[in-house]
Amino acid sequence: MLKYHIDKIPDLRVSEPMVLDLSLSEEIGATPGVFLVPETEAEFKEMKGRISGSLGREGTDVMVDVTVDYQTTLSCVRCLETFTRKGEVGERTLFFHEKGSTAEELERYGRDGWVDLAPWVRELVLTDLPFYPLCHEDCRGLCPECGENRNTGLCTCPTEG
Ligand SMILES: [Zn+2]
Ligand SMILES: [Zn+2]
C-alpha cells in the first residue's frame, strides 16, 4: 500500500525514516488512478519495477524521497511495433498538512490524516514516458506505398527524392 496514516509515519526528530521498497506493478499497475487517461492505462498494466526510497515527517510535514525503476511496453508512433522502455525517475517532495491547506493540498494529503503516494508516483512515471514513443531514434516507420515496416527491409518501393 502506498497509503500511510500520519500516526504511522516516523517523526524524524526522534526516529529513522521508514524505508520504502515496493513492487511498482502491485502498487501502481493494478488500480486505476486519477491521473490516468485511457491510452496510458495499458502502459501502467504492463509496468514492472520497484519503488524505493524513504518516508518521514517533522510534525505534520511529510517528506518523501523516492526513486522509481520501471519497465513498460510502448508502441512506436512511426512503425507501430511494441518495444520495451526502461527508465528511472526520482523526486523528493513534501506533503503539508496545515489548517490553511488549499483544496489541492488536502486532496494530496487526505482529509483524515492519510497520505496517498500512489497518484504522485503515477504522475512521476507518466511524465517520464515519452510523448512520441519511438522504438529507435532513427526508426524509418511504415512505407506509405506498401504499408510494410521499413525497418525490416521487406519494402522494395523506390525511395522518393
Ligand atoms: Zn519504430
Ligand atoms: Zn513500400
Image (tube, grey):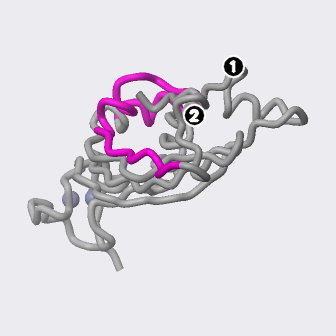
Looking at the rendering, the stretch of residues picked out in magenta corresponds to 15-42
Q: Please rate how many residues cluster around mark 2, counting C-alpha atoms within 10 Å: few if below 14, some from 14 to 19, many from 20.
A: few
- The picture quadrant for ligand 1 comes to bottom left
From the viewer's perspective, tell me whether residue 158 is left or right of residue 75.
Answer: left
Q: What residue lies at 20% left-to-right and 62% top-to-bottom?
A: 150
Query: Which quadrant of the figure contains the C terminus?
Result: bottom left
Q: To which quarter of the image does residue 113 belong?
A: top right
Magenta-drawn stretch contains 144: no
Which residue ends up furthest to the right in the rendered image? 100
| Mark 1 or mark 2, earlier in chain | 2
Residue marked by disc 2: 35
Tell how many labels.
2
Q: Is mark 2 within 8 Å of ligand 1?
A: no
Q: Secondary structure at mark 2?
A: loop
Residue 13 falls left or right of residue 8: right
Q: Residue 119, located in which quarter of the rendered image?
A: top right
Which residue carries the number 1 mark? 112
Residue 12, compared with residue 135, is above or below; it is above
Point 90% across, 36% down: residue? 100
Q: Position of residue 16 (x, y in %)?
A: 47, 52
Foreground mark, 1 or 2, reads 1
Position of 106 with respect to 128 (left or right) is right
